[in-house]
Amino acid sequence: MSISYKDLGLVNSRELLKKAVDGGYAIPAYNFNNLEQIQAILQACVETKSPVILQVSSGARKYANSTLLRNLARGAVEYVKELGYEIPIVLHLDHGDTFELCKDCIDNGFSSVMIDGSHHSYEDNIALTKKVVEYAHKHDVTVEGELGVLAGIEDDVVAEHHTYTEPDEVIDFVSRTGVDSLAISIGTSHGANKFTPEQCTRDENGVLVPPPLRFDILEEIEKKIPGFPIVLHGSSSVPQKYVETINQYGGDLKDSIGIPEEQLRKAAKSAVCKINIDSDGRLAMTAAVREVMATKPGEFDPRKYLGPARDELKQLYMHKNNNVLGSAGKA
């Protein structure tokens, strides 16, 4: 027996993304695996009055159990009411790689799914994406496709090299698949080690500066499909304060370099209306946990280190909504 996302009080992403394109901002798409993460996400988005896309990867479903995650999302709708301001919430499958996985999520209350066929040939990507779209649209569920490949590692998604999105392919891909949004590759990548030092330059202070995003490709895509919702994956900025804290308290993060926030803000003012951020959240929580463990070695109550981790994550996401994505006040 299938469950509709409408019965959970969720919304799909169609109208949210359209408003974001027209308004020159991006909807935050934050991944969660546990209670503390979803608490931080919802608190941050309620306090900044931002819509939110709660993302679940296939790895998260394996880790936390799909039924528990669905019920966390159901509780999210009631939780924001208790927090005092109702925001629109999308429950989205991140990087679904098979029709069966997407179908299972749709049947279990997800309001949006991504089918990532980018590892297939172009024609096979179209065929798989179209199959998911046809099933999803019968249930009024929105679908994100992907064209181009991002380098890096995130859960089960692994690629060694970028394949930039070809602007000449986007009209054909969108029209033949019927997708509601399109993830593209313009230089972002998964994980905390997005670039090697050799790929970067140094500013006047000796700080490594990564290569700029390919805004020329983005502009060509916008010309081909004007007003169509574009998505950026792998968009964590890898705040160096978290890297330094982690390393200070026993970590070993080398060459952790992310996407400059000013570039993401520029992208959010374009047709990029959904930006995925996961690694930054992992870094924020890990830094907070490591600091507690190191400075209070006698502590063994999980609430005493997961609580600070949740609070740090909330502050990070409030910053993202206010200063990077521009989504604050748009709920």
Image (tube, grey):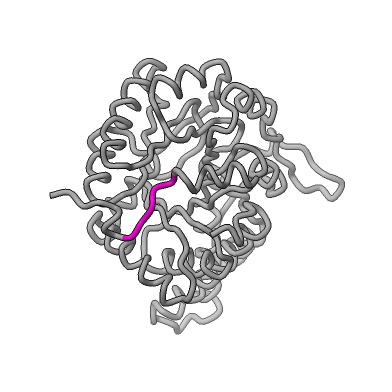
Q: Note whether residue 219 is visible.
A: yes
Q: Position of residue 65 (x, y in %)?
A: 25, 56
Residue in the foreground of this view, choosing between 130 and 206: 130
Side of 124 relative to 2 (left or right): right
Q: Position of residue 302 (x, y in %)?
A: 39, 77
Q: Residue at x 34, y 48 (%)?
A: 111
Q: How many marks?
A: 0
Task: Judge whether 244 appears above or below 224 on screen.
Answer: below
Q: Position of residue 216 (x, y in %)?
A: 69, 26
Q: Note whether residue 257 is visible.
A: no
- Residue extending furthest toward the left: 1
Residue in the foreground of this view, choosing between 52 and 212: 52
In terms of image quadrants, where is residue 180?
top left
Region in magenta: 9-13
Q: Residue at x 33, y 31 (%)?
A: 133
Q: Position of residue 47 (x, y in %)?
A: 56, 70
Q: Residue at x 41, y 31 (%)?
A: 179
Side of 142 relative to 171 (left or right): left
In terms of image quadrants, where is residue 264?
top right
Q: Residue at x 40, y 19 (%)?
A: 176
Q: Majority secondary structure of the magenta segment? A: loop
Taking the magenta stretch, the answer to whether it contains residue 303 is no
Side of 254 relative to 205 (left or right): left
Residue in the foreground of this view, choosing between 316 and 265: 265
- Residue extending furthest toward the bottom: 298
